Amino acid sequence: MMYKDLYRMASEMVPRAYAPFSKFKVGAALLSADGQVFTGCNVENSSFGATICAERTAFVKAISEGTMEFEAIAIVSSEGEAWPCGICRQFMKEFCDGDFKIITGDDEDSLKVYTMDEILPEGFRL
Ligand code: THU
């Protein structure tokens, strides 16, 4: 699976986002170690704190289906490049090694790729 393909799958999820409050739509595509892709979008709520980000939607879908090992996640927003929020960085840290890849960018020809360790150095895990 090429990063561009994963990015494209994430961008296809952007229209599915439920974001009537922020209008900021996000799509994610999570690649597992065995080659499956789990997609996600952000799902907002009238009680704003109940909102779930696209990244966590994808992780929860994967884990609830029995997949626990991951290689990379691509993230795209309605405004192009999108970086995981602090809660999502911590959430991902629970399930990912330091070399797990986070892929984003304004389009598939200008992808930025960072590792888990780069976006959450010295991250917390019990
Ligand atoms: N959002 C995500 O889905 N992923 C991120 O990493 C950043 C934020 C969503 C949450 C909320 O629905 C909207 O973007 C604005 O914060």
Image (cartoon, grey):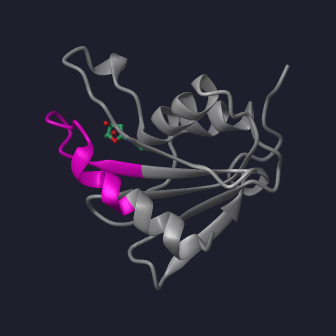
- Residue lying at 35% horizontally and 17% vertically, measured from the top left: 50
- Viewer-nearest residue: 61 or 111: 61
Quadrant of residue 86 within the rendered picture: top right
As drawn, 24 above or below 123:
below
Name the residue furthest bottom.
109
- Residue lying at 79% horizontally and 52% vertically, measured from the top left: 117
- Viewer-nearest residue: 86 or 112: 112
Horizontal side of residue 15 vs 31, given as left or right: left
As drawn, 52 above or below 47:
below
Residue 41 is situated, as x and y percent measured from the top left of the image, at 36, 42
Horizontal side of residue 83 vs 46, given as left or right: right
Q: Which quarter holds ligand 1?
A: top left
Does any portion of residue 24 appear in the rendered image? Answer: no
Residue 83 is situated, as x and y percent measured from the top left of the image, at 49, 54
Which of the image's four quarters has the N terminus? Answer: bottom right
Name the residue furthest left.
20
Does any portion of residue 88 appear in the rendered image? Answer: yes
Residue 126 is situated, as x and y percent measured from the top left of the image, at 85, 19
In magenta, the rendered stretch is 11-27
- The magenta stretch spans residue 7: no
Quadrant of residue 115 within the rendered picture: bottom right
- The magenta stretch spans residue 12: yes
As drawn, 71 above or below 2:
above
* Count of marks, rendered view: 0
